[in-house]
Amino acid sequence: MRNVPIDRKGGARTLLKLVKAAHHEIGSGEGRQILLFPEGTRRAPGAPPEYRFGIAQIYSGLNVPCLPIALNSGVYWPRRSLKLRQGTIIVDIMPVIEPGLDRQTFFALMQEKIEESSDRLLAEARHDLGLPFNA
């Protein structure tokens, strides 16, 4: 899979290495795609978002479209738990964010799209399971 390892304590140096490695993979001519989680980790469903601005640096450095995705898997497979709930995990693939936006605009737009979709998916999943929205 040619994963790019990330040193979470490396700060800006790690981010520069990540952009360089991602740029190499995108330019390899092999049709490679980069998959990033903009928060860096899973969070509990409904928890306040903690997006990392590094995603905007990567978007800017690569100059390629970004395909935002939201999912409701945390309702059925909770963070830090082996307990699984029966249900259907939904993956919402949203419209592409084209390259060329400034970092702040991209960052705000990406968060808005993902959070709106995540909130909707979370409400639907909790309704299906008979759970209150803030469970």
Image (cartoon, helix red, strand yellow):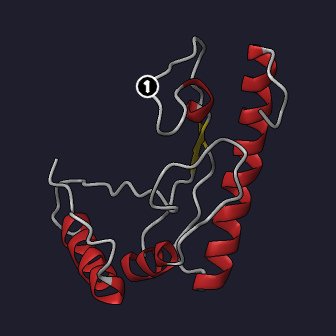
Where residue 91 appears, x then y in whole percent?
Answer: 56, 33
Quarter where residue 58 is shown:
bottom left
Residue plotted at (81% across, 20% down): 127
- Return the residue nearer the eye: 65 or 120: 120
Residue farthest to the right, as pictured: 132
Image quadrant holding the C terminus, namely top right
Where residue 67 appears, x then y in whole percent?
Answer: 52, 54
- Return the residue nearer the eye: 11 or 60: 11
Reading the image, the residue beneath label 1 is 82
Relative height, residue 92 to residue 10 (above, below): above
**Which element is circle 1 on?**
loop
Residue plotted at (81% across, 37% down): 134
- Return the residue nearer the eye: 50 or 63: 50
Residue plotted at (52% across, 27% down): 77
Quarter where residue 105 is shown:
bottom right
Quarter where residue 14 is shown:
bottom left
Q: Amino acid at mark 1?
A: Leu
Horizontally, residue 56 falls left or right of residue 33, namely: right
Residue farthest to the top, as pictured: 86
Where residue 48 appears, x then y in whole percent?
Answer: 71, 58
Relative height, residue 124 to residue 45 (above, below): above
